[in-house]
Image (spheres, helix red, strand yellow):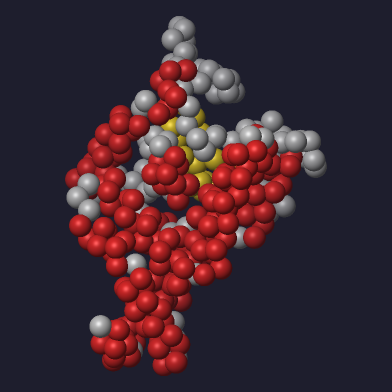
Amino acid sequence: RYARGGGPKLSRFMGRPTDLSPKAFLKHYLLGHPLPFDRHDWTVQRADGTQVRYVIDYYHDDAVAREEDGSGLPDMHDHDSVKSLLVDVRPAADGVGEIWGRAVTMPLARRGFGPKTTFLPLPMVPSESLRMSVGESREVWANIQKDAAAKKGVGAKDDACASDSLDDANNAEEEISMQISPSEAQKIAESFSRILSQCEAQKKALKECNSEEECNKAYMGMTVCAGQFLCPLQHYSFLQSLEGYETAAEDGKNEGVEMAEAKINIALDVLGQCVAHNDKKAAEARRQFPDVFDEVLKKSK
């Protein structure tokens, strides 16, 4: 609903407990952060009428839980009552404006440049108490997946809702009518062939993984490896963001680390979306020109 004074309103929201966001994936498998126990995607209509999708990951830190009487039923406006509930919220990387907001506008606003804000993002690197709950978070995540698989209604989504873009409600129709030229199919097939050759280790790891943790790591490795061929610009940006984080961490300045963290999770978001888009395009190209793909793959053997 609209906030007082005609401010932003919640246009729609969707629970996605079985979907791990790219940022949560990065935090867990690279930085040792617990897995979230829930995820929501909120679409907010701002006062000027624009709609922005926000990704929200929910975490629990039992070490800071309050045990006073009434702390389990706090007032809805008491933001400090449930300190054990940690929320990682940010605009989805659906457009240039959202990316700029996450990487530049918000970090600067927290330092007094432009509109002031008291919002502090959840750190990428977990606290010691959070590190101790990694095992428990994996058990919770595994139970969520089992529950969804058994009931099929928990966390279920249609194709449009499962995507990472507000425009994807129309994407299925666009993909069906996607027209690919023979020359374009040839280039796509050659890129696909290079991926099979250069990402052989990642492909093997993905094929042979036995646990969900192993498979998620293998999937991330395959995404990054494939990205260098399918999305070279986005892949380069991701590598640069990792280097930037290392430099910022060595400098020891909190503001630099915060900016670097924002750039990493945005770069990973963008890379993952680009690879997924090109993967769909490759599947369509192979459907339309199977002979082209077969010929290219035979030459590569």
x 46%, y 76%: residue: 174
Of residues 135 and 76, the one nearer the viewer is 135
x 49%, y 41%: residue: 56
Residue 160, how many percent across, how many down? Answer: 42, 61
Residue 2 visible in the displayed image: no
Residue 126 visible in the displayed image: yes
The answer to whether residue 252 is left or right of residue 108 is left
The answer to whether residue 155 is left or right of residue 112 is left
Residue 197, how many percent across, how many down? Answer: 32, 74
Residue 296, how many percent across, how many down? Answer: 32, 87
Q: Quadrant of residue 224?
A: bottom left
x 45%, y 50%: residue: 22
Q: Which quadrant holds the N terminus?
A: top right
The answer to whether residue 111 is left or right of residue 231 is right
Residue 205, how many percent across, how many down? Answer: 26, 58
Q: Which quadrant holds the C terminus?
A: bottom left
The number of discs equals 0
Q: Does 240 appear above or below 56?
A: below
Q: Does 32 appear above or below 168?
A: above
x 67%, y 35%: residue: 253
Of residues 52 and 116, the one nearer the viewer is 116
Residue lying furthest front:
250
